[in-house]
Structure formats: structure tokens, C-alpha cells
Amino acid sequence: METLYDKLLSYNDEGIYPFHMPGHKRNIENINFVNPFKIDITEIEGFDNLHNPKDRLADLMKEAADIYGTKKTYYLVNGSTCGILSAIASVTDRGEKILIARNCHKSVYNAIYLGGLNSFYIYPDTIQEFGINGCIHPEEIDDILTGNKDIKTVLITSPTYEGIVSDVKAISEITHRHGVPLIIDEAHGAHFGMHKELPESSIKLGADIIIQSLHKTMPSLTQTALLHVNSDKISLSKLERFLSIYQSSSPSYVLMASIDSCIHYMHSEGYKKFSEYMDVLLKYRKQFKDLKNIRLLDYPGSDRTKIILSVKGTTYTGKQLYDELLYRYGIQTEMASADYVIALSSCFDTEKGFHKLYEALKEIDSSLDFYKKINKAKLDSQYVRTEKKYSITRAMEFETEKCSVKNAVDKVSAEYMYLYPPGIPIVVPGEVITEEIVRLCRNYEKSGLDIQGIESGSLDNIKIIKE
């Protein structure tokens, strides 16, 4: 059997262009980083300990905090996931209430389960033209906090996987007026603030904790991230206790070196690199907008490094566009949804790569037709509103039984269902399964998309609460 190492080497030689994370795009000519085996060590003399930093690592994280302008910045070697788990645990106690955006990543729901929390949801808009999640409205957060004085924290995702940004400044002002800390999952926005055409980072907009995945959009190895503390509302000792639980007890010095290298590169040479990259990106975005049938999302205030290509209203599905780009043109995009494809770009993309994508899209676009007698499923969102009957923790304690999804209407789910990526649940344990959810899941399945989270792996055998 071919080893994973050999598979990675052979894949790298296939010439498939990466419009997906990690942000370094396997293109590190300008970054001096050697064979990782030469620098893979453990907590030996002179190299400090991430879980009890006193000298070198403490100094590096202090320097990172100074660069980002935060009260404290922590290195994360278990991705944004461990940062989200730790952040939520640091501002809540078991059984307390939390308000989250319903389009949060599955790690947020895992934190709710682990903490036995009672979750309240706020739903984003839907951008109907593209069928994707929009922003969170600040006034809705204000209304919920006004009616629920015992909510302990608020967490939203900004930017979303598609690059949609909420008004974090207004939301932070509201949460602070209610005496509640604001956590921002900014995993996809580590590059914010690097160029005038990009949104401002939540660090500058008043959020209390901000979690960023460096590897998603910056030149850093997979699994590297940062957690920023931006206010005095956070107990650092409690946060650090949970970081020591959710991070590996054997943190990789290779990953920590990658974080250090990324931060220093981006804040020395990165602004020049971003300026050159944005010139190229904006040139090709203009060309993408000239396509006749494939449409480019150009939502006001959104992250323009995310290239969202919609085939809604044509005879194609997102999965067909994804497959054609990969198998016919050698372009690997980040993900496919029902009606669109996401191509993630970064400052390490090349003009040659953008040109290759444009030429492929132009050729595909010329062959597309709008609806004739094609009856393609209508799929406008990755979730539908549903009733929460039990908390996630309570739902996981019930006796369960299995049935097909079509027989689960009006039953209460005992497991998750989500598309991955991006990992936003369609259904959460404790929520009522509706006919609309069944229709959505079946249509996703027909479109060739993989619904995950189901223990059996099949919509014909899902777990519901036995009542």
C-alpha cells in the first residue's frame, strides 16, 4: 500500500493548482523554513514550555500581542477549535446560557455540549441571490440580551466561510452595554487589516476574545492559530486552564516556529506582498464578474479574497462545477455547496494560478445554459429554522432509536447533520426534524454533497430520541 508520505509527494508533482487552504499554497520560496524533522523537538532546555511559558515562548507571545495590539495573544497548535473550546469555557460555568449565531462551526456546539450550556440562537440573513448565509443584525442581539439577562456570553462567526462580515463594532457595543463578553470566531480572517480593500479585524472593533486560524489564509502550517484577548472582562487564569486541557500536552515546536515565522514575515514583508497580491486579485475579480452564467459574489464589505462562484439558475450544480475544475482543468477549489463553489485565495497565489482559473471558468461558462426543462433542487441555505426541544447535553442523555430521515419528521434528533466543509450543523441534537429539513438533506444528497455527523453515515439510518 502507498504510504501517506508517498501519496503527498506524488500529489505535489501532479500540478493541480490549490485554490484552498492552507494559505501558504505549498509555495514558500520567500520563507526560510527548513526540513521540519531537523527542528522537531520537545520541551528541552532553552526552548520553554507552551503550557507554562516563562522565557522564549512567553517573549514570542508577548511580541505577538504587541504586534496585534492586544492585551494577550496565545499560540494555538490544535487549530482554532481548541481556541473556541477554551474561550467559551473561560467565560461560562456549567449549565449557564450562551447566545450564538446559528451558523457557527461545529466546535462551538461541542463546547456547548462539554460545558452543559443552554444555547440561544440568532439567525443570520440569507443572501437570496446566492443562497448563502448573510450577516448578523446587532439589534436582534440587543433584543435577545434584553429579554434574557442571564446570558453569559455571545459568540458569532465573522467572517463566514463565504467571507460575509457582520458589524462587530456595533455588536460589541451592545454586548458590553449588557455586561456580556463577545467572542468572535475570526478563523477565516487572520489576514484582515493587511490591505485597505479588506475588512478590519475584530481586534480593532471591540471584541473581547478573537480566534484566528493562521493556516487558512496566511503562510503558516495547518493547525496553527492564535487566540487574542482584548479586554479585562476575561479571566486569563481560567482561560489558560482550559487551554492546557484542550491543547496537546506535547505541542509541536515545528508548528510554533511556523506561527512565529508567519507573524514576523507578514508584519515585515507581508504588507508589500499583500499589495501586489490584491492588485492581481482585483484584476481577476473584475474578469470573473464579466462571465455570463457563472456569477461572482461581490457583497458589500465582504472579504474579497474569497472567490464565491455561483451557478444558481443554470443547468449546473456547485458539485459539477467543482468536479469539472478539478478533473478537467487541474484546479482544486476549497469546497462545493449546492449552487456554488468557494475558491480560497491568499497572498501566496500566483498570477499564473488566477489566469488558469479564469481561463477554465470562461470555457465552462460558455457551455452553460439557464433553466429549460431542468428541474434542479432549490437549495437556499445550509440550515432551516427549527424548534429546540432540549439542550444538546440533555438530548445526548436520552435513549435513542434509529429510523430513516423521511420517517423522522416531528421527531427530535439525537445527532448532528452537517455539510463539511464548512461544518455548520443543519440539525443539532435536541432539535425537531421538520419536513423542510428532510427535503433539504435529501436534495443535498441528490446534488452529490456529503452530509456528515450521522453515526451510521446514512440518511436512512439516523438517531432520534426515543419518546
Image (cartoon, rainbow, N blue to C red):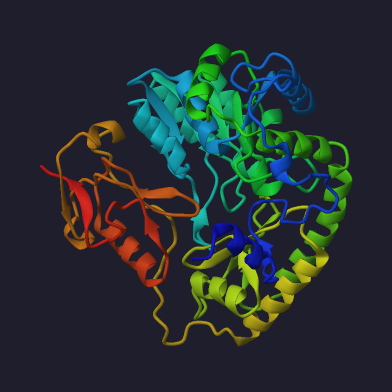
Residue 466 against residue 280 in the figure, above or below: above
- Tally of numbered tags: 0
Q: Which one is in front, 429 or 326?
A: 326
Name which quarter of the figure residue 19 lies in.
bottom right
Image quadrant assignment for residue 460 = bottom left
Is residue 32 something that shows in the picture?
A: yes
The residue lying toward the viewer, choosing from 349 and 198, is 349
What is the residue that sits farthest to the left in this orientation? 467
Residue 117 spot, x, y in % from top left: 35, 26
Q: Is residue 103 left or right of residue 200?
A: left
In front here: 30 or 353? 30
> Residue 187, how many percent across, how many down?
60, 41
Residue 101 seen anywhere in this rendered image of the structure:
no
Q: Give the residue at x 67% y 32%.
A: 41
Q: Quadrant of the C terminus?
A: top left
Point out residue 178 in the picture as x, y percentages from the top left corner: 50, 18
Is the residue 139 above or below the residue 281 in the image? above
Residue drawn at the location 22% of the way across and 58% of the way down: 461
Q: Quadrant of residue 333?
A: bottom right
Residue 233 vs 194, above or below: the answer is: above
Tell me where residue 55 appears, x and y as whole percent. 73, 15
User: Residue at coordinates 65% horizontally, 21% vertically from top-left?
Assistant: 230
